[in-house]
């Protein structure tokens, strides 16, 4: 009986392998199949003799059949903020050998994204990075990374101090995205640009509006954005003479948040540090900011902000050598950020 079933079993396994050519990784689970089409808002995947449409806001990334192994390493390194490693992996890819169009587009996106992240943090060429992002959306207007490219352009402009232009990119994303969580994310980015400009009442109004957007809307993605908007609100409270309320808000958020949400925790500890500083508690502020370089160093903007604060806080608590160390790291890794330029 086993010998009779074996050929059928082999055929079944091979059939599954053929169908599982591409892998769309979502926040919930990886989906195997073949990518048949994509737009800026959805990806069409053929799997198990049926066609499934996946919204882009649920997609973490896509692994394409036949892609260079280094491309997966590039994605992982970028996600972890290891931009130098990502650049090394990217340089090893022989683009001339890549024939599949979807893979070519993915390489183009990560090349532009990496250039933008490096320019935002360590002093790379911002104009060239911006041009690469603009070329990507012009050349591949139907790629599922288009909204992410506009968002990256906004982040680059914000990092280099062009807040007005950054806002235009964020507003475009907000207008084009059909999902509440994506609109909230764009709103949070605009709120942060106002924080950077020390327009605290305006920023508070934006964060409150984002929180209201998420009220009554179910889903983990919306909940995450609501928490990020709450972090922004806490930063505004610190600057508005309501630091104690901000501390309570952030403490509750840190307790409730999933430990796997590393970026949220990094931003929350910075907000907690800002609240303690505003309340005149330098030691508590120091301990809050220290969480970022020690536990969450892979998020460039959060790490740079923490280092900026640690430069002065170490002096306040009587440790000038540690202050110099924080200053050196800030200059070395984040020379192009507002935090290093202040």
Image (tube, rainbow, N blue to C red):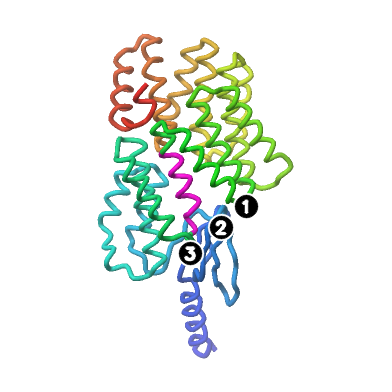
Query: Which circle's residue, 3 or 2, is located before the other in the chain?
Result: 3
Q: Which mark is residue 178?
A: 1
Which residue is at the far right?
216
Q: Nearer the viewer, residue 107 or 49?
A: 107
Q: How many marks?
A: 3
Name the image quarter holding the N terminus. Answer: bottom right
Residue 205: % across, % down: 63, 28
User: Which region of the structure is painted magenta?
Assistant: 144-156
Where 18 falls versus 81 (above or below)?
below
Residue 248: % across, % down: 63, 22
Q: Nearer the viewer, residue 98 or 342?
A: 342
Q: Which mark is residue 42?
A: none
Label 1 crowd (10 A; few <14 / some 14-19 / many >=20): few
Secondary element type, mark 1: loop
Task: Kindly check if marks 2 and 1 are in contact, taking CB atoms under 8 A apart as contact.
Answer: yes
Which residue is label 2 attached to? Answer: 41
Secondary element type, mark 3: strand
Left or right of residue 157, residue 246 in this image? right
Residue 337 appearing in the image: yes
Left or right of residue 196, residue 310 in this image? left
Name the image quarter holding the C terminus. Answer: top left
The answer to which quarter of the image holds residue 234 is top right
Residue 294 appearing in the image: no
Query: Which circle's residue, 2 or 1, is located before the other in the chain?
Result: 2
Secondary element type, mark 2: loop
């Amino acid at each position: 009986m086993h010998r009779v079933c074996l050929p059928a079993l082999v055929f079944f396994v091979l059939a599954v392998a053929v169908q599982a050519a591409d892998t769309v990784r979502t926040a919930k689970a990886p989906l195997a199949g073949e990518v048949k089409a994509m737009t800026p808002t959805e990806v069409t995947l053929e799997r198990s003799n049926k066609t499934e449409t996946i919204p882009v806001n649920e997609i973490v990334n896509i692994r394409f059949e036949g892609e260079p192994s280094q491309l997966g390493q590039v994605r992982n390194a970028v996600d972890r903020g290891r931009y130098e490693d990502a650049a090394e992996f990217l340089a090893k890819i022989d683009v001339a050998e890549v024939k599949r169009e979807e893979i070519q587009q993915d390489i183009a996106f990560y090349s532009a994204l990496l250039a933008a992240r490096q320019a935002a943090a360590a002093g790379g060429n911002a104009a060239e990075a911006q041009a690469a992002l603009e070329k990507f959306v012009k050349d591949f207007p139907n790629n599922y990374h288009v909204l992410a490219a506009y968002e990256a352009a906004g982040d680059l402009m914000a990092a280099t101090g062009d807040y007005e232009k950054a806002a235009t990119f964020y507003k475009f994303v907000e207008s084009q995205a059909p999902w509440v969580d994506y609109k909230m994310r764009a709103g949070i980015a605009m709120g942060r640009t106002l924080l950077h400009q020390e327009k605290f009442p305006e920023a508070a109004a934006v964060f409150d509006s984002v929180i209201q957007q998420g009220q009554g809307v179910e889903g983990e993605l919306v909940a995450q954005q609501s928490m990020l908007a709450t972090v922004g609100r806490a930063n505004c409270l610190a600057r508005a003479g309501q630091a104690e309320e901000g501390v309570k808000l952030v403490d509750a958020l840190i307790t409730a948040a999933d430990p796997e949400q590393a970026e949220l925790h990094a931003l929350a500890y910075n907000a907690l540090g800002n609240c303690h500083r505003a309340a005149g508690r330098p030691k508590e502020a120091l301990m809050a900011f220290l969480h970022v370089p020690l536990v969450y160093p892979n998020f460039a903007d959060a790490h740079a902000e923490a280092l900026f604060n640690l430069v002065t806080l170490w002096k306040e608590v009587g440790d000038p050598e540690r202050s110099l160390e924080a200053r050196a790291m800030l200059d070395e890794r984040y020379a192009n950020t507002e935090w290093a330029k202040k």
